Every structure is written in C-alpha cells, then in structure tokens.
Amino acid sequence: DIVMTQSPDSLAVSLGERVTINCKSSQSVLYSSNDNNYLSWYQQKPGQPPKLLISWASTRESGVPDRFSGSGSGTDFALTISNLQAEDVALYYCHQYYTTPLTFGGGTKVELK
Amino acid sequence: QVHLVESGGGVVQPGRSLRLSCVASGFNFSNCGLHWVRLAPGKGLEWVALISSDGTNEYYTDSVKGRFTISRDNSNNTLSLEMSSLRVEDTGVYYCAKDPSPSGDTTLDSWGQGTLVTVSS
C-alpha cells in the first residue's frame, strides 16, 4: 500500500498569512505514460464531507479560490494557502489515486492563531 | 448539480449486517466509477471500495474483503454497500463519492453528506 505522510499534523496561523502543508508518498504517484501525478487535496470542515480542492497535484477545481495552490511531483507534494481567510479553517487531506487501495494522508488541521 | 444522498446507517451489534445506499442525481451516473470512503471517530479518511461504471470491476480495502460487497443499479442511479460480519472498528461515517472516470481511476470529485454506522454491543 502507498503510505501518505502529511506534515505538520496541525498549525495555527494568523489571518492573511501563508500556509504550506506537505505530503509525502511512500512511492511515486507519477504515471510516466501520461506524466500525471495521481494526487489530490481535500478540505473538510466539521460535519461536512470532504471537498475537492486540487487534482493532478496542481489543477485547481472550478470555484476554488486562487489562494489555494498545489505543487510537487513524484513523491513530494505541497498545498499552499496564500493569504489565509477565516473560512479556510479546516482539516486538509492529501490523497493518492495512483493505485488501489486508494490512500489518504492523516490530515492537517489549520486553525487561527 | 451533483447530489449524492446516503442512507441506511444506524446502530448494529458486532457480527450483524447492514446495507447502505446512495442515490445519485445531476450527472451521468452510468458513466462514472463510484467509491465508498469512511471516516472513523478520531481517525482520518479510509477508502473502502470502488465499483466501475458498468459494475464489472470491484475493488476493496483488505480489512473489508469477504465481508463487504459494493454494487450498483444504473437504472435507478443507486450505489449500495452490503456490510456483513460487522466489527467495532467498522464504526464511522460512510461517504459515497463519484469518480468522473468509468474505471474509477481518477479523483473523487463529489461526495455525499455521509451516513453514520455504529457497531456496538
């Protein structure tokens, strides 16, 4: 199974600050035949289902604010939130869909300082 | 607009069975792979099962193989999860999720609100 390791587990930041969440996979999720990274990022707020923010490591979903961006390739990825807003307080998960069993990172909790 | 509505959750004793359903609307159901994902209390997301658009291919996480069966009815836009020999560790919120590819090998782009399963004596 591909193990997804997120860091940090949690962080507290001030409004307007930049947040970076890291995600490392135990093996590459880059499919060489199409040069796509099979990596997504989700946001989950209490009592709500996960919401897809980023797919293919760096493709922002329609309607997701451009302060959210994804980067990385192979085994090392990052989600960056520039200019943190109050509504961004949530849990964030990375997810690999390169192979079954699909796996998720343990989650990173973003709180306001 | 995509809608996925789960039902069938509840409190069940260990060893018993439960059937979850997910009714979908707002997209071409028969062209999409479908997944079940669960969120256990105090833990992270765990993928449970996947079924391809035509129902011919099914995949499961190891811990549910032989106990859970995923199925779909494309004529009624319904996804199901038959769970048997339930264990305490199966407790959690179960989400159905849509995958835009027929084979279910891309990301999960829409999720239902979830249904809570509690396995307890």
Image (cartoon, coloured by chain):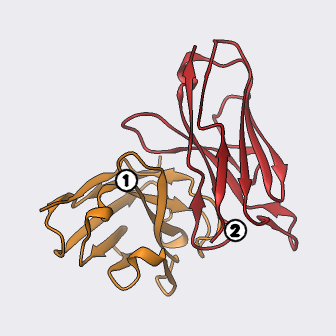
Chain colours: A red, B orange
User: What's the amino acid at mark 1?
Assistant: Ala
Q: Is residue A58 visible?
A: no
Q: Is residue B68 visible?
A: yes
Q: Residues within 10 Å of mark 1 (few under 14, many from 20)?
A: some
The quadrant in which residue B19 appears is bottom left
Label 2 resides on the chain identified as: A
Label 1 resides on the chain identified as: B
What is the x, y in percent for residue A39?
Answer: 71, 56
Circle 1 SS class: loop
User: What's the amino acid at mark 2?
Assistant: Tyr
The residue carrying mark 2 is A98
Name the quadrant of the C terminus of chain B.
bottom left
What is the x, y in percent for residue B8?
Answer: 21, 61
The residue carrying mark 1 is B40
Residue at the image position 58 percent from the left and 66 percent from the top: A102
- Nearest the camera: A95 or A35? A95
Residue at the image position 43 percent from the left and 49 percent from the top: B43
The quadrant in which residue A93 appears is top right
